[in-house]
Amino acid sequence: MANNFIPKEVLAFLQRKKLKPTDHWTDLWHGEHARYFTVARSTYADIVNDVYDEVVKAIADGSTLKTFQDRLTPILQEKGWWGKAEDGVQLGSPRRLRTIYDTNLRTSYAAGRWERIQRRKKSRPYLRYVCVLDEKTRAEHRRWHHIILPVDHPFWQTHYPPNGWHCRCIVQQISQEDMDRNGWSVSETPEITWREWENKATGEIKRIPVGIAPGFDYNVGTANLRVKAREQVAEKLKKINPDIARTAINSLVRSDDFADFYKNPQGYFAVGVVDDLIKQALKTETALCCLSDETMLKNQKHHPDLQLDDYMQINGILKDYDTLVQDSEKSVVAIKKVADKNYWLALKVTRNGKEIFTQSYHLTYSGQIKSLLRKGKRLK
């Protein structure tokens, strides 16, 4: 798939990703792969940066698999991330590098292609599933060959390729004129059968469409656009009057998109505006506070008592907190009682001082607040 012409959307998809070492590829799920770049079994080695740099370089240069392998192999060997680990798990190998190269290349192109599909769907409103029909083609994928459905059909949210490791399927965007010229017609909605799959790392049971590899049963293009749109909104809110931004956020956190972010965190979401006291404490010029998917997922795991309505309170807490404590150079904690609930909202500023994110958010009690006041510097 190496190509000397790289659509700008393809490279942008990769360049927006943040790096995240993991033990297993399934530690990230669905849309998380649209925001993070990972290499399984990389948590104990500083190889994620090396692999990411070479993947971006390979896609930007249109490099072949062999060139990618030749550049990366000696780097990984020098760092000891090669061969089998002590527990028998495969680390670096030519086959592993082929999988990394192929998966990132195909998902990046798929994400970029979906952006173009959305731009052209008024004039080309249909997608046609296309397989490489040879002996390597999976039987299930072969059955989907030539399915034609509208761009916005739900089928493409689970079956938009790639649909597995080394899947070579693509979609062809077509117009009504293409349909008429070829004598094609819209397909009946395919019947989807499901199977249960257990994530061995977490014990969680997932329902996966038959024919699709676990973790590939989502539309990488939709996830990418969702992440991109949320980031673009945050960037716009940073540049406008804080009072206007605060009002806008009050509407945003009551939207369907925030409800979707709560259920399926992807990217980050603007959730509040801080005042001058917090800006001074964190030594930053930005007033916008965002909630990342990573923090939301951790919060939902450790504080399941918080519901969607509780997360809608963040903007109000930042506007009128009862107590503010600086607990480190780069973080503060705001305490606010709302009705019968005491909220603890910890904020942190990034290293470059240009972004503020929620660090933790939960219900608190008097003992925890007293402990915070003893350790930190009370600002209010």
Image (cartoon, rainbow, N blue to C red):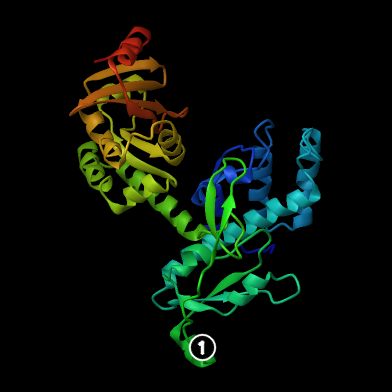
Quadrant including the N terminus: bottom right
The residue positioned farthest toward the left in the image shown: 339
In what element is the residue under mark 1? loop
Tell me: 46 left or right of 327: right
Q: What residue is drawn where x is 53% and y is 61%?
A: 112
Looking at the image, residue 318 lies above or below residue 268:
above
Image coordinates for residue 49, horizontal then vertical, percent = 64, 38
Looking at the image, residue 156 lies above or below residue 101:
below
Tell me: 289 left or right of 8: left
Tell me: 151 left or right of 313: right
Quadrant including the C terminus: top left
**In this rendering, does residue 215 appear at all?**
no
**In this rendering, does residue 250 appear at all?**
yes
Image coordinates for residue 76, horizontal then vertical, percent = 77, 38
**Which is nearer the eye, 376 or 4?**
376
**Which is nearer the eye, 101 or 162?**
162
The residue positioned farthest toward the top in the image shown: 374
Classify residue 123 by image quadrant. bottom left
Label 1: how many residues lie within 10 Å, few (<14), some (14-19) or many (20+)? few
